[in-house]
Structure formats: C-alpha cells, structure tokens
Image (tube, rainbow, N blue to C red):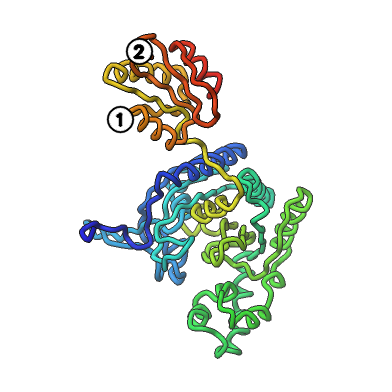
Amino acid sequence: MANIIQAVRGMREVLPDKTALWQRVEKVAREVLGAYGYQEIRLPLLEKTELFKRSIGEVTDIVEKEMYTFEDRNGESLTLRPEGTAGCLRACLEQGLLHNQQQRLWYYGPMFRHERPQKGRYRQFYQLGLETYGMAGPDIDTEILLLTDRLWKRLGIRDKLELQLNSLGSIEERLVYREQLVAYFSKQPELLDEDSQRRLLTNPLRILDTKNPEMQVLVANAPELMDALGTESREHFLAITAQLDDLGIAYRINTRLVRGLDYYSKTVFEWVTTELGAQGTVCAGGRYDGLIAQLGGKPNHAIGFAMGMERLLSLVELVPNVSAEAVVDVAMILVGAAAESVGFRFAEAIRDTIPGLKLLVNCGGGSLKSQFKKADKSGARCALIIGEDELAQNHVSIKDLRIETAQQSCSQAETLAYLKNHFS
C-alpha cells in the first residue's frame, strides 16, 4: 500500500456507485436545456492564459492565486480552464457564431482552480454552464431563471434553493459607485481585513461579498449600488422582477450580491441553499455585455450562468427516496460451457431486439448459488437462467429477484416477449 500513487490533492474520482446518480442529473439537465432550445458546445480544457487575464481580470483571486498555468514546450503560457464563459465566448468569436446571430449554448465538464479543498469545493470540479448571445432585453434574463427553476423542480430540490437577484448597472454606473465605495471604506481602514484592504485598491465591489463576520456591520452601512443605477439599468431590472412576479417565481433582492468576476454588468443572480453549510451557492451568473468587445468582438449582448455539479449532487442526495436509474435490469446466469455458448448468442439476440435493456451476462464461471448472489447484488429485477435442465428442454428459466414468485420456464421467443413486456 505504501507504494500506491494517490490522487492529486483536491482532485477525486467518481466511483461507480455514484455515477448512476450523476447520469440521472445530467440526463434531466439535458432534457430541460433541450426543452428551451439550447444547443451543446464542447470546449477545450486548455486555453491561452491571456484569455482569462483579459476576461476574468488580472486582479481577481482566480487569476492571481487559483489558476493552473504553465508554459508548454513552445514557451506559450497555457491555463487549465478555471471557468467556461471566456472559452465559450472565444470559440464563438473565432468561429463567427455571433455575427447577426442569436445563440443559446450550454457546455459541461471539469474546471480547475487551486483552492483549499473542502466539502463541496475541489480543485477539479464539474460545471454545467449556459451562455446566450445577441439578446439585449430582460426577457432572456427571465428565461434562464425560468430554466433553472424548472430544473430544480424536475430534480425535486426547488424548496431547498432561494433565488437572489441584484443589478450591477452599466460599467459607467459601476465606476461612479466604485468611487463612492472607496470613499466610504477609506474613512475606516482599520475595520478592513487584509483581503479587503487589498481589494480597496483593485476591486472594491468584492468587499461587499466578504464572509468575515467582523465586517458585516461595516458592509451593511455601505452605499447601495441600486441608488447609482441610471434609468435604463433600473427599468431592465424592474422588468425582470415584474416578469418573475407574474410567473410566480419567488426571489429575494440582495443588494450586496456582486459576483466574483469583473465582466458582469446589469443582472446578476445566485441560487443559494442553507442545506450544504458554507458552500451555499449552487448556481450563479449574470449579464456580461461588455466582455465581447473586451475580447475583440463587436459590441454585443450576453448573459449566462454556471452551476457546480458536486454541490448540486449533494443537494439531490438530500431528497428522500432519491434513486438513480438501474445499472442492471436483467442478469443472465450461465452454468457450464455449453450454457455459455447458448447464452452469449441469446444475449446478443436480446440486445438486438431490446436495445435499451441493461443486460448483465455472468462471466468467470461460478456455481448457480454464487451467480444468484452476484445477480441479486447487481440490482437486477430478474434473472435468466440457462443450465443443464434448460439446455435439455431448449428453454430459459426466468426468476424475479425482487418479488417472491415462482420461477418460470419459457422458450427463447417467450422470454423475449416477457422482457419486452416488462422493460420496453
């Protein structure tokens, strides 16, 4: 055991007893995304480091402290993606997907940040992200909130999540507000912790997002960003809340919600829970109209979100009687070499006839008793048995493994009909 190489700290595998639930959640997410007309885009794990410096911001924690960055053999600085928005936008600009077009896109896969590992936070973590381009109005903001609301309902966790909303206004409005914040916090520098003192010079809005309990009174009395919004930003935000009210979607306005990335403007939101301890944000995003021009494209409109799959799965596991799809539907027990020959041919015929059936054929031999134990452990609903007696009659025995019923003896045609009736 001392010589076994262990996983890199903060990176973990998902074992087979958990992957079935992951697959269930992924399947529901794909169905919901498809129901709203979103298309999948698959993105590289590696991007040029400059992409994240220009998009996320050089003075953010992600770029300063958390990115996995290295030089390749050609001396080019590359980074394992810490988030998906920048890469998705880069791909759309490079492939010409934004010119006179609207796009509704989603992506899924691992992201990488060198953070302190803890429950619900890993250095390799999975995100499902959604990005839309070319739509300026509040209706698309509302749509993606409806989409997430529907996903939570499908997964049975809507009652465990609260939608929090805020508006960051335009870049110009935020610059005015930034000056107000700097003036306010500069009057009481002794009350700022080390991180906040640094952010005061680089990104003072992030001070509002501090988790330091000793700073909560100071932050609570800071100027309100809402007071700095112009007419357009205010009307955009009020249109979203009016639509959510009309559709019966509950939310809470959180004026201290600023998000951690520099590229957000106008709408920002988080779906948060109190069920997972400190890691309470399950899904978050907002509008980032200015980022497209920042990365070299023509000015355009964009809004999106990302959700952490590990946190989402932790929340789904709290639902009573939650279950994943069965890994195995039917187990085939084969006793003897002759039975194996017949069984493999019949198993392939079953798979041809019922493609969606999950059929586990015993391999490695074993007694009838030991094979029954393996079949039961697999979770299969029934077993198909072929042994000496079945071979002699050219039949297959069917045994229900979950309900106490008599074992049936059927021809192969009758067995196929049975399986179609019970599993199609």
In percent of the image, x 64 and y 59: which residue is there?
267
Q: Residue 174, how many percent across, how many down?
A: 61, 70
- Residue 400: give its label: none
In percent of the image, x 50 and y 52: which residue is there?
309
Q: Residues within 10 Å of mark 2 (few under 14, many from 20)?
A: some
Relative vertical location of residue 413 with respect to residue 5 in this rendering, above or below = above
Q: Of the residues under marks 2 and 1, which one precedes in the sequence?
A: 1
Which of 218/424 is in front? 424
Residue 144 visible in the snapshot? no
Instruction: From the image, tell me which residue sits under label 1.
Output: 366
Q: Amino acid at mark 1?
A: Gly
Residue 360 visible in the snapshot? yes
Instruction: From the image, tell me which residue sits under label 2.
Output: 391
Q: Residue 275, how many percent across, how many down?
A: 60, 61
Q: Residues within 10 Å of mark 1 (few under 14, many from 20)?
A: some
**Left or right: where 136 falls relative to 244:** left
